[in-house]
Each structure stands twice: as structure tokens, then as C-alpha cells.
Image: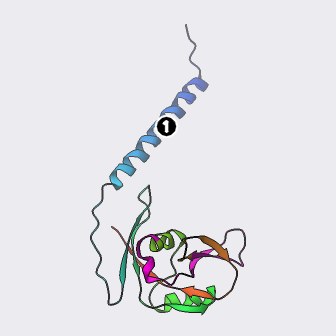
Amino acid sequence: MTTITLEAIKTEQNKIAQMIATLEAQAKLESAFPITIEMPTLNAGERYVGAIISADGSKRHHIILLPGERDEINWKDAKEWAVSIGGELPDRTESALLFSTIKDEFNPEWYWTREQHASNSDYAWIQDFGDGYQDSNESFEGRARAVRRLEIL
């Protein structure tokens, strides 16, 4: 006969709690998809780029490229300029999407992203629209384009 102990019951309880948490997470993920995406209204000069939807459904937004461009601008000024026209510099994922979908809207040179390098705060990430390469760059002057994001509900 097997002896039932408090420790054995707690171990089984932990296993069941983990199974419940896994099923709840799965149900949450399943409820996030499928989704229907309505095309956003664009303002004059804007270009629709696409939608970014994270695997867990928590990040869901449209990316719209704003008209206008700046060159010979440092990262700090590029971020301020983007805000001044109602947008923001794209992040690295958005920059890769820009390259893969509408690179004809860009000069074949590098552009600032909004992301600062994690291990070196003097550097920010850039997207090269000549070859698609992403790298980090110090406070040199480069090019900038702005995007706006619309949440997908």
C-alpha cells in the first residue's frame, strides 16, 4: 500500500497548477487569432507598409510610412524630427518590414531606427536600404524616415 504524504499531495497540486496555467495560456493565444484587419485610412503622402502581429498577439499594429525624409541628421535630432511630424523612427522589426516591402521609397543608404544599442548607449541601430543589413552606429549623421502606428483592435 502506498502512503500518502502532504509532500506528495503538494507535488501533485503543483503539477495540476502548471497544467492549468498551460491550458489558460493556450486558450488566451487561441482567442487572439484569427483576427480581421481593416485597412487604415491614409493621409496625403502616406504609404501603407503592413501589419506587425507578435506570435502571442500582444503586439498588433499597422505601420504607415510618413512622407518626408531628413538626411545628414544625428540620431537624437532624427527622433525629435520624427515626433515633430507626428510619427516616430521605426524600430528594427519595422525597418526590416520597410526594406522588404517598400525599399523603393528609400535611398540605398542607411537610416536610423528608434532603437538604442543594448550594450552601448552611444550607439543606435540602423537599417541599410542598399543591402538590408542592420548594424549599430555611433552619433554620426545619417538619414531618417518616420512611421506612425495604428493599433489593431
Give the magenta-colored segment's residue range: 100-127
Element marked by disc 1: helix
Residue 56 versus residue 60 in the image, above or below: above
Front one among 91 and 11: 91
Q: Which residue lies at the image location 43% right of the left edge and 47% below the top edge? A: 25
Q: Residue at x 32, y 90 (%)?
A: 44
Q: Residue at x 72, y 72 (%)?
A: 120
x, y percent for residue 79 = 56, 86
Residue linked to disc 1: 17
Q: Farthest residue toward the top?
A: 1
Which quarter of the image is occupied by the C terminus? bottom left
Q: Tell me which corner region of the image, top left, top right, bottom left or bottom right, holds residue 76.
A: bottom right
- Residue 19 in the image: state x and y as whole percent: 46, 36
The amino acid type, in three-letter code, at marker 1 is Ala
Q: Position of residue 72 (x, y in %)?
A: 61, 92
Name the residue at 58% across, 13% down: 3
**Viewer-proximal residue, 41 or 58?**
41
Q: Is residue 14 left or right of residue 29?
A: right
Residue 56, position in %: x, y?
44, 55
